[in-house]
Amino acid sequence: MADKTVTIYAYDSDLNWLGQREGDGTELQEGESLLPYIVVYGFDAGSKELTTTKVVRNDYKVSDTETTTAPTPGLYTPITWDGKQWQGTDEATYQARVDAEVAQYLADHPVEMTDDQKALAALTLQVAQQAETNTQQSQINAQLLLATAQATANGGTTND
């Protein structure tokens, strides 16, 4: 055992500071560190929207636009600070907003195919049409073979 006592800091899985204890520092438990750090979450003074996350020493002075309270898991942007806790949207609301933004972007920036892409699309269409023609021809061939087999079975006639 070491002769010197050191401060051991405890953190949760998101690096939020849970507390500290004294020890020799040779056997740290899960979530413990010899480094005194905390996570600070910054927000815009006007909109209160989450802007930054940083890891700092635990003696750091938190400003008026920062907090050590972590956002609740499962919040979607925009995530805002109400003075006590973080507020955000649910996944469905977030996804609807993103879908609308993507649709608007695509409307504002239509995708233009290059000449090579147009040529490739035309060739792909031709191959698909040829495959359809081949399928139809195979069906006709099968019908003709069946009719020939029936005619042969009937002594050379197709009448029943």
Image (cartoon, rainbow, N blue to C red):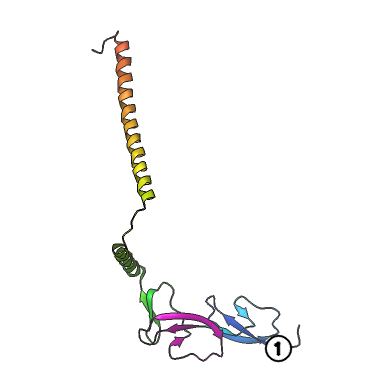
Residue 39 in magenta? Answer: no
Instruction: Residue at 43% x, 76% y: name it.
Output: 72
Residue on which disc 1 sits: 5
Residue that extends furthest to the left in the rendered view of this protein: 159
Describe residue 23's horizontal placement relative to residue 111 as left or right. Answer: right
Describe residue 50's horizontal placement relative to residue 31 as left or right. Answer: left
Bounds of the magenta span?
Answer: 40-67
Q: Can you tell which quarter of the image residue 26 is in?
A: bottom right
Q: For mark 1, does the 10 Å Cα neighbourhood hold few (<14), some (14 to 19), or many (20 or more) residues? A: few
Q: Can you tell which quarter of the image residue 65 is in?
A: bottom left
Given residues 10 and 109, the one toward you in this image is 109
Q: Quadrant of the C terminus?
A: top left
Q: Where is residue 126 in the image (x, y as percent from the top left)?
A: 34, 39
Residue that extends furthest to the top in the rendered view of this protein: 155
Given residues 95 and 2, the one toward you in this image is 95
Q: Position of residue 87 (x, y in %)?
A: 37, 79
Q: What element carries label 1?
A: loop
Instruction: Residue at 44% x, 78% y: name it.
Output: 71
